[in-house]
Amino acid sequence: ATDKAVDVLAARGIDLGGHRSRALTAELVVDAELIVAMTRRHEAAVTAMVPEARSRTFLAGEVARIGSGVGPVGEGGTAAWVRAMDGARGGHFTTGRVADEVSDPYGESLESYVRCADRLDEFARTAAEDAFADEVRTWLEAHLGGANSDLRGRGGVGQEDVEPERLLEWECELATGGWLGLDYPVPLGGRDASLSEQVVFHQTYVEARAPGRIPNIGLTLLGPTLVAFGT
């Protein structure tokens, strides 16, 4: 790794000191289950070296964009996951999008390395947020059925047609799943969720037509104050 790459990632808490770059060879390509390229030029170089590897070669942005739609690696392992991604993009004759590329900073300024790291961070956040949305969606689907199926699309301001007791029971169910105080520390029953994760939760909650929430000043005002300043 270059000194600039080491320094930029060290500032982000990643130790790259032990990394050693290697020239790409046909043997490395043949042995790889997944090949991640930064640019379409890199992607083409891999295909020219080993044409059969095209179906296993993706741009960095493709891995985040398509992989999040395919879902996590399952029982079939990485190879099955890669095949699913290739199928989702339309097969091996489909080239990646310009928006999926990451400019190669090699030989460029330190600022170029910083921009590259920022771009990769964007892809990582997108994939993580999609995975978080899937977790929220799965939980809501499992808990908004049966006795709670009548709560969908009900409650909230101007729709006070649900007994407060029912909504309170729903709040308790959210609490058992760790969805009540999203940004609370895990030991206090929360998820220590980031701001973006909180936004994802509320968007997914609305999309699932989950019931309107009971206003809770204790949760949103008193609770955070105690977490920050209580002893």
Image: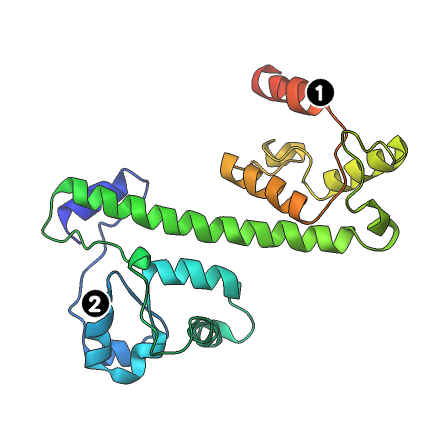
Give residue 35's position: percent from left, percent from top: 31, 70
Q: How is the image coloured?
A: rainbow
- The residue sitting at 64% across, 49% down in the picture is 136
Q: Which dot marks residue 57?
A: none
Q: Secondary structure at mark 1?
A: helix
At a point 84% along the width and 48% down the height, the residue shown is 148
Choose between 61 and 174: the one closer to the eye.
61
Q: Are marks 1 and 2 in contact (CB under 8 Å)?
A: no
Q: On the picture, is 20 further left or further right than 217?
A: left
Q: Is residue 8 visible?
A: yes
- In the picture, residue 54 is in which quadrant? bottom left
Tell me where residue 135 appears, x and y as whole percent. 61, 52
Q: Which residue is mark 1?
A: 217
Q: Which mark is residue 42?
A: 2
Which kind of residue does numbered mark 2 sit on?
His
In the image, residue 48 sits, relative to residue 176, either above or below, namely below
Is residue 72 visible to the viewer in this orientation of the structure? Answer: no
Amino acid residing under circle 1: Ile
Give how far across and how far down residue 107 sits, in percent: 9, 51
Q: Quadrant of residue 86?
A: bottom left
Residue 125 placement, left or right of 193:
left
